[in-house]
Image: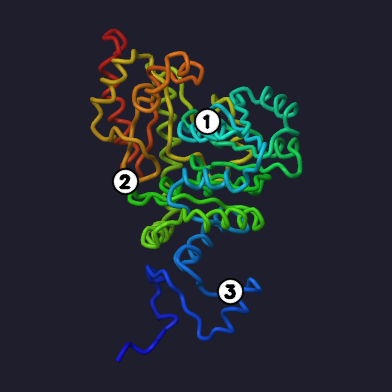
Amino acid sequence: MGRVRKHESYTNSILTPIYQNIAYFYDDHETYVKALHEGSLTKGRYGRYHNPNWEEVEGILAQLDKAEDCLLFPSGMSAIYSTLMAFAKSQSCFATTCYLYKNTRRVFENLEKLGFKTLILDNSDLSELMRTLDQVSQDINILFLELPSNPHLYLADIEKIKELLEPDTLLVVDSTFASPYNFQPCLWGADLVIHSCTKYLNGHADVVRGSVAGKKEAIAQIRNFRNINGVIPSPRDVFTLGQHLKTFQLRMESLNASGQKLTEFLNSHDLVSKVYYLGLDSHPHRELSKKYFTNGYGGVVTFELKLSKRETSEFIDNLKIPYIASNFGSAETYIEQLAPFTYYYLSDQDRKSLNITDSLIRLSIGFNDPVDSIIEDLDCSLARYIPTEIH
């Protein structure tokens, strides 16, 4: 005899179990068909469309971003690409800025290859950015901003930008470098906000995930794209992300405090020529950070040394605490010499145009590493390059 159909819809577990299943059943044909035709399905339909783990964590992320709804994706890049393609039409014009993550820049290059029009705007000079947007705003269908930008942590005045855009132009903000603890773009006019949940939100360097949050109508269109293309996250990884979100505020409080303290040390060091951190008055977009950021400025600090390319590499090699690796927002501290490590594929001229110098470094503080120990480590390694008479 075959197994008799049986179902227990819930348990008394405090944690939502991991729902690894694909199929969902209904008690009778009429209930299912009626709900499907009326668009009122309250339970799962199929594993590519619904999952209780997704819905739970998406609800948490929507609250953090002060958004109406949210969708999870396998990575931050899949969230970006799916969002843009969900709204793509013939003759669509996508605009972004020149200072942003290298692979996001490649997405826009691919959009151009597909026949879409793309505009790349300079956001280092905010006045010029506003003038340019005023001239081209009628042509733009989607404006994508990375705020803060990688690695210089540049901002833009999204409240004023939203006023310049046409009512039907979509304003999308990648706020991975801020996290929703520090910055909520939806409160300032953004239609959609994207995160690489891999970074601050997850915080443990063990899960790759992405999210997009915003208005229900826009999220519904992206959901339809996700349903068709199957760009869905693993329930097990989403469960892990949900567990790590329980310590999100504590981790961000620690990283914000450590970032500010480390920045002040670097800013006062004789061998440091420039520091990019939104908590410093010397940052070109400091006034905007005061306007938009609520709790702090994160654990990523970018700085430039008065050293050659070779000396900068030696300085990093002599450090004891940071890993030479690409990531941020986790328990470990990471460090990168950006020109040879991240922007190696660009010509010298292209790197110069993006303000990527040979001695530019991105340091990402780990919340398990005491900031005083990181400062001591940096100070000891820098001391090798201070002339004897200065000691």
Specify the amino acid type for callout 2.
Asn
Residue 40 image-quadrant placement: bottom right
Task: Specify whether 313 is left or right of 259.
Answer: left
Q: Mark 1 points at which residue?
A: 109
Specify the amino acid type for callout 1.
Glu
Residue 387 image-quadrant placement: top left
Please, what secondary structure does the residue beneath circle 3 have?
Answer: loop
Q: Name the residue under label 3.
A: 41
Q: Mark 2 points at which residue?
A: 368
Q: Do the residues labelled 1 and 2 touch (CB within 8 Å)?
A: no
Q: Is residue 167 visible?
A: yes
C-alpha gap between disc 3 and disc 2 = 44 Å
Please, what secondary structure does the residue beneath circle 2 have?
Answer: loop
Rendering coords of residue 279 (x, y %)? 52, 33
Q: Which of marks 3 and 2 is in front?
A: 3
Judge by depth and name the residue closer to the eye, 310 or 272: 310
Please, what secondary structure does the residue beneath circle 1 have?
Answer: helix
Judge by depth and name the residue closer to the eye, 257 or 88: 88
The quarter of the picture where the N terminus appears is bottom left
Disc number at residue 261?
Answer: none
In this view, 151 is above or below 360:
below
Task: Specify whether 77 is left or right of 364.
Answer: right
Q: Which of marks 1 and 2 is in front?
A: 1
Rendering coords of residue 179 (x, y %)? 50, 46
Specify the amino acid type for callout 3.
Leu
Rendering coords of residue 233 (x, y %)? 43, 56
C-alpha gap between disc 1 and disc 2 = 38 Å
Judge by depth and name the residue closer to the eye, 238 or 177: 238
User: How many numbered badges does the structure rendering display?
Assistant: 3
Q: Do the residues labelled 3 and 2 touch (CB within 8 Å)?
A: no
